[in-house]
Amino acid sequence: MDANGFFGSWGGAYIPEVLYQTFQDLKLEYARCRKDPAFWEEYIHLMSTYSCRPTPLTHAENLSNHFGGAQIYIKREDLNHTGAHKANNVMGQGLLVKRMGKKRVIAETGAGQHGMATATMAAKFGLDCTIYMGEEDVLRQRPNVFWMEKMGATVIPVKDGSRTLKDAINQAFRDWVTNVDDTHYVFGTACGPAPFPEMVSWFQSIIGIEAVDQIIQAHGKMPKKIYACVGGGSNAMGIFKRFLEEDVELVGVEAGGHGANSGAHAIRLASSDATPGVAQGYKTMFLQDEDGQMKHTHSVAAGLDYVGVSPILTDLWEKKLVRFESATDEEVMQALDLTMKKEGIIPALESAHAFAGAFREVGKLSVDDAIIINQSGRGDKDIFTIAHAFEDPSWEKFIIDRGKEYSKKHSG
């Protein structure tokens, strides 16, 4: 990142004047933390005592045998506290908030995992917390909303636009503009105005730092490829960052939705639909029309239907250092089903995109090779969406019966 927050041609900080001093203070505090070894030590201690770091690297022997190609290893961010990689970034920003002396945090969330992590951090550090979540995502991720509220956070459904992640981000920025003195915006992914893309990637880099040592211990050499799903890009940057130094192919898998030609997807870098633009405080590739209006997106995974992508990943894509693919909703459900049946592991729908991308290619590699799939989260948060997609009759009956029971109880 250069002095103006750009990664090549991408990034920057396109912010309103009212936020200028807030960003200056944030950049200064972040720079101090980067130079202070004690801060990183404090962060590692927090994550190893409050969360579940280091998360394990699991050898998926059954899946490896099934495909007959490279050995498949899974980096288990689903075992991190709150069930996803999101805690890595949130706890790091929580330590920053303590240093800055702010008393309130706000956040956006799509799949709900970032909201869950932020509510958790706020409870631990004694901060007021408001979470903005698209109304559509509130309906898809009701279990996460329930837990956020139980931990003391205020969850505000956003009814603007497509009622998904991009709209939640817009609303969070509106809040921040009017509450700059006591509020910090805990941005959830490696997007937005500088220094957020670099800062989020730094906290998430703990994933790749651990994985390098773990794959050498387990396999004796570097993997051939690493796969990660890509919405905004925080889990991908988390595992890619360290491996950029190695001779390893990095593959990001975007949300193919109903297909690349359907108009119902969130494919930015794996197709020609996205174009350069500036929105939400930074420059990257966006799904937008000729007038610069953001298009509606779709994914079975609430955390991947974002209209933009990390400027860091856009720079790496432009430099051909990361390859991008996509996986359709159908492919994702098939990969999820296979992973559950073969390994007893339930990836989040977001993570299942990485599995789908890996499953297409792993059989073409040698059994002496290895790949790593970054499992960014666990799938229990997706139970309603997964059960609906599988058209599970017993689950449908359960929901109907519980609804009748609840209605009867509260009908007087």
Image: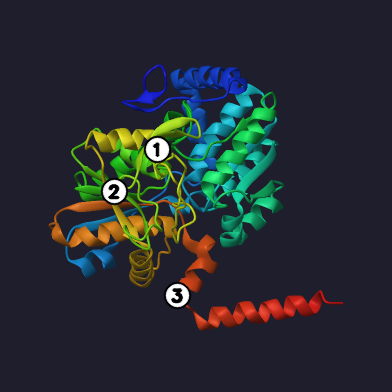
- Provide residue 245's location: percent of width, then percent of height: 24, 32
Determine the CA span between mark 1 and mark 2: 14 Å
In the image, which disc is placed on residue 281?
none
Residue 310's tag is: 1
The answer to which quarter of the image holds residue 122 is top right
The front one of 242 and 114 is: 114
Q: Tell me the quarter of the image containing the C terminus.
A: bottom right
The one of 84 and 39 positioned closer to us in this rendering: 84
Q: Earlier in the sequence, mark 3 or mark 1?
A: 1
Q: Position of residue 298 (x, y in %)?
A: 44, 57
Q: On the image, numbered disc 2 is attached to which residue? A: 270
Q: Which residue is mark 3?
A: 390
User: Which sits earlier in the primary sequence, circle 3 or circle 2?
Assistant: 2
Task: Name the amino acid type tagged 3.
Answer: Phe
> Hey, which quadrant is residue 286 in on the image?
top left
Give left or right: position of 105 versus 225.
right
Q: What is the CA distance from the residue labelled 3 to the residue labelled 2?
A: 27 Å
Query: Going 40% across and 52% down the picture, which residue do you hit?
Result: 266
Residue 92, image x, y percentages: 52, 33
* Residue at 21% from the left image edge and 42% from the top image edge: 248
Label 1 secondary element: loop
> Is residue 256 visible in this depiction of the protein?
yes
State which tag comes first along the sequence, 1 or 2: 2
Quadrant of the rendering where the N terminus is positioned: top left
92 vs 343: above or below: above
